[in-house]
Amino acid sequence: LIELLDGDLEAVYAASGLVWRPRYTPVLRVLMRLGPVSIKVLAQEIGITHSAASQTVAQMVKQRLVALKPGADARERIVVLTARTRQMIPALQRQWAATNAAAAQLDAELSVPLSAVLAEAIAALNQRSFATRISAAATAPAP
């Protein structure tokens, strides 16, 4: 499902002339809301690991979408938007609106809205992680 959705979304971004990946969107939304932040804060706000946030930021740095500035101590790095990305924001916001409209149309076609199922799945996984479920299944007696 992720491959189908993200693959099409990347193709739409490219067709619109945008050098953008879906995984960049949460980073941009946090930076738009909070301004420059550390990778640690970014990870916390998005709800991903520090490592995942750092990897995404590294990809964005390579594409000159964000820059890293020194933080309060030698280890901390602050993520800031580049002028290039700030100029892309209106086009990205139009794309996000179209994406939300398409998602609403998809929800309307399904017997159960995908957004509702995803919200339930996320809540269940927050209660009991997939890793915990796999461990339990691996140690359970065979049926």
Image: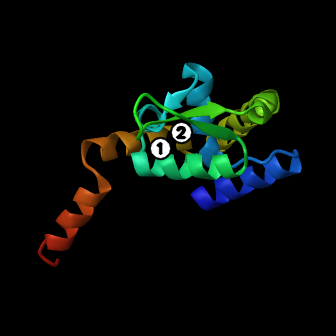
Residue 1 appears in the figure: no
Camera-side residue of 87 and 106: 87
Q: Is residue 109 left or right of residue 141?
A: right
Tag 1 near tag 2, CB within 8 Å: yes
The kind of residue tagged 2 is: Ser
Question: What amino acid is labelled 1 in the image?
Answer: Leu
State the residue in front, 32 or 70.
70
Disc 1 element: helix
Q: Secondary structure at mark 2?
A: helix
Residue toward you, 84 or 139: 84
Tell me which residue sits at (65%, 47%) in the image. Answer: 60
Quadrant for residue 102, please give it: top right
Q: Residue at x 72, y 49 (%)?
A: 63
- Residue under label 2: 115
Q: Residue furthest top?
A: 34
Instruction: For residue 74, say whether it is visible.
Output: yes
Residue 141 vs residue 52, the one in the foreground = 52
Seen in the image, is 48 located left or right of residue 34?
left
Residue 118's disc is: 1
Where is 5 relative to 66, above or below? below
Q: Quadrant of the N terminus?
A: bottom right
Name the residue furthest front. 74
Q: Position of residue 127 (x, y in %)?
A: 26, 42
Quadrant in which residue 3 is drawn: bottom right
Residue at far bottom of view: 142
- Give the residue displayed 75% in from the left and 34% down from the top: 85
| Colouring rule applied to residues | rainbow
Left or right: where 81 falls relative to 143: right
Residue drawn at point x = 49 percent, y = 48 percent: 54
